[in-house]
């Protein structure tokens, strides 16, 4: 599932994938220009989240950690399901919650 957005003039794309088990297994957040600091940091964040998901962390861990974080870019998103975000982390949390609200947690 891929969602595109623009926060405070900064375009981005969030792609998530569900594993055969039905659990969220992959997060790919792309923001900024290739080679930029912002692009590198969001790529690293995506890798860390995906690694944690594959190790058994439930998506709610990331939603709880990033929801309502405040830093720039922030503002309207152009995404009708998540119209406003207080940061890229907040957008990510809101979108994960919207796209994967009842994915089961691993025991």
Image (cartoon, grey):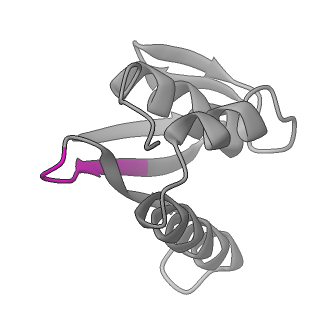
Q: In the picture shown, does residue 44 fall above or below 21? A: below
Can the viewer see residue 74 in this picture? no
Q: Quadrant of the N terminus?
A: top left
Residue 66's spot in the image, x, y percent? 73, 39
Is 55 drawn above or below residue 23 in the view shown? below
Number of disc labels: 0
What residue is rendered at 60% in x and 76% in y? Answer: 44
Is residue 62 among the parts visible in the rendering? yes
Residue 83 is inside the magenta segment: no
* Position of residue 2 measured from the top left corner of the image (x, y, whole percent): 25, 43
Which residue is most to the right?
A: 70
62 relative to 14 in the view: left or right: right
Q: Nearer the viewer, residue 37 or 9?
A: 37
Quadrant location of residue 74? Answer: top right
Q: Nearer the viewer, residue 30 or 45?
A: 45
Q: Residue 33, position in %: x, y? A: 52, 72
Q: Main secondary structure of the magenta part?
A: strand
Location of residue 85 in the rendering, given as x and y in whole percent from the top left corner? 67, 25
Nearer to me, 5 or 56? 56
The answer to whether residue 88 is left or right of residue 19 is right
* Residue at point 55%, 52% (across, down): 57
Residue beneath the point at 48% across and 66% down: 55
Q: Nearer the viewer, residue 16 or 39?
A: 16
Furthest toward the left, the residue is 20
Q: Residue furthest bottom?
A: 35
Is residue 14 highlighted in magenta?
yes
Q: Residue at x 66, y 36 (%)?
A: 8
| Region in magenta | 13-21
């Amino acid at each position: 599932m891929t969602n595109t957005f623009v926060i405070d003039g900064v375009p981005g794309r969030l792609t998530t994938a569900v594993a055969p088990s039905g659990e969220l297994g992959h997060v790919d957040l792309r923001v900024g220009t290739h080679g930029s600091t912002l692009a590198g940091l969001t790529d690293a964040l995506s890798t860390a989240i995906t690694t944690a998901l594959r190790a058994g962390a439930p998506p709610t861990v990331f939603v709880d950690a990033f929801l309502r974080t405040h830093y720039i870019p922030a503002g309207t998103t152009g995404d009708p399901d998540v119209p406003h975000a207080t940061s890229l982390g907040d957008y990510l949390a809101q979108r994960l919650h919207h796209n994967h609200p009842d994915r089961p947690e691993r025991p």
